[in-house]
Amino acid sequence: IDAEKDSWMLRSLCILVDTSHGDLHLYSGSKRRSNKNRLEFSRVPLSNVSRPSEEAGRHLIKLRRKGIAPPVAGQSHFRPNRLHRFCGISGEDGLFAATPRPLWFVSERGAPAVVSHKSRHVSPAGGRPVPVSGFCTTMPEVFQSAKNGFITIHERIGRVGSQRLTLYNGLWDVFAPHGILPGGGISIQKVPLGVTVRHIEFIDDASISSTSRPVYAMLVSHEIEADQSYLNDDGLSPEERQRIRNEKEAARVRKQVEADLGGFDIEQEWVEEIEREDCFTIDTSLGLAPEMPTRKYEVWLVDASSQWSILDKHQLEDFEHGTALKVMYLTDVVEDSDEIPERSLVIGVGTSAIDQDGEDLASKGRILLFQVKKSKKRALGKGNKDPPLELMLTSEKDMALGPVTSLSSLKSEDVYRIVVGAGAEVTVEQWGSGKLTQVGFYHAHMQVQEIVLFKTFFLLSDAYDSLHFLVWRESDKSLTLLAKDYEPTQVFAAGLISRGGAMSFVCHDDRQNLSFLQYAPTDAAARGGNKLVCRADFHMGSQTTSLKSHWSQSSLLFNSCTTTSTLAALKQQDSLFGRLEDDQRFAVNFGTSDGSFGSIVPLSEPTYWRLTALQSVMSNALESNCALSHRAWRLFRRSTRRAGCRSNDRKKGVIDGDVVMKFVDLPLPEQEDLASSIGSTVGLVMDNLLDLGCAASVV
């Protein structure tokens, strides 16, 4: 009874309205404080555009012109119900909206949340009004295993009008015990591993991973209590300890006398080794040496299909820290041989070794190469369907240049090599005869933070000296500097965004700023092509350590979770798709230290100026939190370092998605007023915001 009472307390009365334009408005009811017998409804902001896109309308016209889609039979304003209420799916109640972008409306800790619905092998948008034309939760008795599931009918790839019926056994992935619905149409499942995950990489190889059994490589660390009982007793007698102490004191006096006779200060000219017994001694009558908290680093091979079980692991050495992990291909190059070199999949791990007494000595690193092999003996013993996998250490190389902070894969003329960032050096290593051999190098200024590769171009981020743009030349196997940013910026993360043939570099610094740089040799601000030109800047307000690129999806492909098959079907319907610059966009996504997730998307010039005008008008027309200014918050924060104040003005040039997406949840009269004030229409602005949301989607 208490459980049912608690579950009902975490529910709220909601009303979902489907307008004639295809927009969804969600209202939540609550009792008024003055009169508890009356309910008042307030609109819940969704920041989600659910109406059909203009691109889908243009695609439908092309299909009708080619005779692929049937012509319009007649003008009919009738539209069947697209809102389906459900009860008891995976123990949850809610509503499924079969709109042009299907959505689930469920409860997340008492508040309504939205989750996007994507289908397998669904046809591109535009052929039919909605991708999901049927939804049913009543299951026949023959499906006892999915009695709490549901059935959908969606438009599948192939002939326009052909449908596919799919049976689901529930939404257990969404409503997992450790599941979270943060908003934005996605669901997150927390996996408790009991360790700190430093790096994770998916092994994209058909012989190892599959859709039913995804395998990941992970670099983890966990806290342990190191035993220091060897400090309690060194095995010497009191007389021997006193003799050693006297010898050290005599040596110290002799050095002091030599310093006095030489006329210099011993504190400046002599560097004495600090030993542990000079710092403290342990009185066993008061207590023994306590256990020292420290970290242990391990490389894990994890199967995500079986609750993230550990298939195999390799423990690093004592006082060795794991700093980099990369799953890549390497080509086994044999010199003076006519045979075609073979490539193999390896897991590269970069480490940093610190002396047990601290950081008095320069840190060194190692490169470890692992291969994933199938264990036949273990497979026969357990009798599993899939043979178990194991990690096999194939090679290791010591790096005296410094700690290995970055590993990347370079492909040039069908030869795969590994790019290593160690200390202030960038080395290109070639695999052959069972070992790594250095074939190229570049010397950075301070410390290599990260290396991002695009074909044979390198984007090198220095921890204290901003970005360097390099190119690899296969003819002489050299790394050549093309341009760099001369601002002394402390780089935390770097990434690449592109639209068509234009590419820009994104830099995130210690002041939580984003700078957008471009290699433009013909620009006057490039100093003859040696300097990266700053095109825009933006204050993000959160700290991140990684900027990963992803392909910006079109609104025609947004409803598919198998974009490869849907894209192939779209190109069969429209052979010209993919030639526009908006179809060739790569954005970056990032996660922040405060738990948020975002994307940076390149926009076309008309869309940018339209949304810029909208952002300016909305910043003045809408109320802000605590009467703070959006413009002031997003201005670039200048650095206080020496020579770190830029003489030119802030570039700006970035649209704040949090501000413009508020336009979706405004009442229609306010939307019309804002759109007319910038010389546009509500439909055009909503279509731009829809395209922005689809391009920013990663999942």
Image: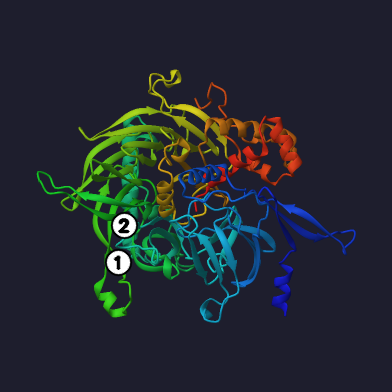
Picture coordinates of residue 517 (x, y %)? 46, 31
* Disc 2 + disc 1, Cβ < 8 Å: no
Mark 1, other Cα within 10 Å: few <14 / some 14–19 / many ≥20: many
Nearest to N terminus: mark 2 or mark 1: 2
Picture coordinates of residue 556 (x, y %)? 50, 48
Specify the quadrant that holds the N terminus.
bottom right
Any part of residue 696 in sight: no
**Outermost right residue:** 34
Of the residues tagged 2 and 1, which is closer to the observer?
1
Which of 292/582 is in front?
A: 582
Residue that label 2 marks: 243
Which residue is found at the position 33% from the left and 43% from the top?
Answer: 422
Q: Is residue 6 left or right of residue 201?
A: right
Which of 96/524 is in front?
A: 96
Tag 2 secondary structure = helix
Picture coordinates of residue 188 (x, y %)? 54, 60
Picture coordinates of residue 252 (x, y %)? 34, 44
Q: Is residue 188 left or right of residue 389?
A: right
Residue type at mark 1?
Glu
Q: Looking at the rendering, which quadrant does residue 107 occupy?
A: bottom right
Residues at marks 2 and 1, CA–CA distance in whole angstroms: 53 Å
Residue type at mark 2?
Arg
Mark 2, other Cα within 10 Å: few <14 / some 14–19 / many ≥20: few
Above/below status of 240 relative to 147: above
Residue that label 1 marks: 390
